[in-house]
Amino acid sequence: MEDPAREIGKIITLLTTTPSPDVQKAAILKYFAPDAALRHPLCIVDGGPGSRDVLVHVFQWYRIVSPRLEMDIRNTTFNPSTNELFVEVVQVFHNRWSPFRAAPARVLIHLVLCSSAEDPKLCQIAVQEDWYHPTDVAALTFPPVVPVVRFLLKFGTVASVINARAVEMAGLWITPSSKGKGVDTSQSQGSAEARPSSYVEPDVDTSGDAQKSKTE
């Protein structure tokens, strides 16, 4: 890759939607480093000698399971100082053996880039991490359980609220609002006490306003 931010969308689409296994394999060999690593909620490939060959089989199985895959590249952010790419993607994974209708699943792809051994001016993918929300993992694997996962997550929220209130009532968790102790929030952000010792008041010219007042 010469321009990762501009090229990555086409590369992801090529890797996941191409109908040709030969084209997919050639793309992996071109854009991934020989010792590339992959971290996914459903599989992991440790980086090392021969790991790229394992990646080829993982991506091929991905296409075998879903011969019809829809990809929507939403956002791309590239940090050149750390050689990291963040890509937001919404995919519709059609499982060939599933009788259920496919559901959109959002994934945030984190890519760590490195210089190509063959051409240092080009970048290759050293690490790929796919981050899914639990509901999106359900949508990817078994769409009918998405409502169940959402219910469990909401139940976790309710349980957190109830447990927090119970612990506060028992006096085991002391907050500034309940006991008057903790961080002093009485000073406003703009007060003189809250300013650092090196703070210098800006010199504002108010002569024009004064002259205007005298005229009026």
Image: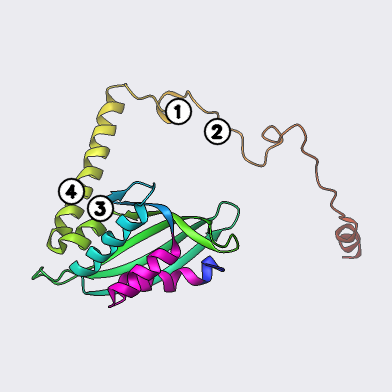
- Label 1 vs label 2: CA separation? 9 Å
Looking at the rendered structure, the kind of residue marked 4 is Leu
Identify whether 157 is placed above or below 3. above
Point out which mark residue 134 bears: 3
Left or right relative to 3: residue 174: left
User: Which residue was labeled with disc 4?
Assistant: 152
Q: Position of residue 126 (x, y in %)?
A: 45, 54
Q: Are marks 3 and 1 in contact (CB under 8 Å)?
A: no
User: Residue at left 56%, top 68%?
Assistant: 2
Label 2 SS:
loop
Label 1 or label 4, whichever lies nearer to me, is 4
Q: Are marks 1 and 2 in contact (CB under 8 Å)?
A: yes
Q: Which residue is label 1 attached to?
A: 176
Residues at marks 2 and 3, CA–CA distance in whole angstroms? 37 Å
Secondary structure under badge 1? helix
Q: Examine the image and state in which quarter residue 18 appears.
A: bottom left
